[in-house]
Amino acid sequence: MQDIDHYLYQQTSLHGRSVYHSDVDFASWRKQLRDRVQERLGGFPSEVADLNPILLERTSCDGYTRERIEITTYSGLRMSMYLLIPNDVSAISDRKPAIIACHGHGYGSREICAMEPDGSPRTEEPGLHKDFAVTLVQRGYVVAAPELLGFGARRLDEDREAPPGTSSCTKIAAHLLMAGQTLAGHRVYETKRVLDYVLTRSEVDPERIGGMGISGGGLVIAFTAALDERCKATVVSGYASTFHGSILDRNHCLDNYIPGILQEAELPDLIGLIAPRALFLEIGSKDLVFPLHSAREAHERLKMIYEHAGAEGALGADYFDGGHEISGAKAYDWLDHVL
């Protein structure tokens, strides 16, 4: 009888050609791997569409203003986001640092902005996201919370009447794969367009832009920062792992899978493309989605990459007592320090 499990393990254990080794030049390795990762994600448009931003609503909140804005990402595709702006932004000379906040699986950007799925103020417990976009704006950041493709208001028409936490990930991802694209790649490129938009805002200091994401949002912000130097500091919560330790160990959402990526490198190497810029990992001791043992393995490999990049001090981590969730116990202070 065929040992299918063993066969699959052999196929996915092939060493990627760009796994980092200390005897290779770091800058050359990073440049080559970046190019190949972008190609594996499906590539990005050669012509950048005009953003054409539209203000959909503006709401006064406790200590900040919340704007809902829509921009063009790909030609023919619009993205909505929330922009949270501290009330004490007064002049160009008082520009604030900005954070791109990426939600994970759930009901979208409202879930990290203290809102219920219908946009009303939250009355229930915040769940794994802990309303981290609101925490960040209350600490003085301008926060952009994009609605990732396939969630919330950006679901397929056929899913609009489904429960709020139901995503359109699988069908969108499947269609894009048939066209030689990936959902991960679309979300990364759209997040780069959010960076484009944030840089147009007079409230934002262009030299102090970072990102924070949880779970699937951790994937998006990690890959965005890996490919875009404008992201100066990144918090990855509940995602740093190895492919074998999580993505290939259970049935994840199809948005996690990138054709041929194991022919390039393992997940810690891909996250390591952020080096030498600042990176902080949140790792829950009871996380059952991205387990502790594989998170430790990823962290140790990232330590080696950062050491060879000459940036040991730019990598931090918080092993907190919790599950698959935002902690913030150390991450927020770390962001304050680096931005």
Image (spheres, rainbow, N blue to C red):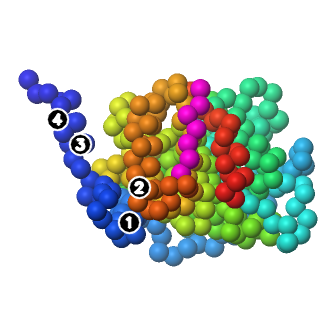
**Is residue 316 one of those drawn in magenta?**
yes
Contact (Cβ within 8 Å) of mark 1 with mark 4: no
Percent x, y of residue 13: 23, 42
Q: What stretch is highlighted in magenta?
A: 315-321
* Position of 269 relative to 252 (above/below): below
Q: What residue type is labelled 1?
A: Phe
Q: Mark 1 points at which residue?
A: 26
Q: Quadrant of residue 74?
A: bottom right
- Could you say whether the residue bearing mark 3 is in a helix, strand or loop? loop
Q: Name the residue under label 4.
A: 7
Q: Name the residue under label 2.
A: 305
Q: Name the residue under label 3.
A: 13
Q: Which of marks 3 and 4 is nearer the N terminus?
A: 4
* Position of 141 relative to 291 (above/below): below
Q: Disc 2 versus disc 3: distance between alpha carbons?
A: 20 Å
Q: Disc 3 versus disc 4: distance between alpha carbons?
A: 10 Å
Instruction: Give 250 or 47, whichever is nearer the viewer.
Output: 250
Judge left or right: residue 229 versus residue 25. Answer: right
Q: Which amino acid does label 3 sit on?
A: Ser
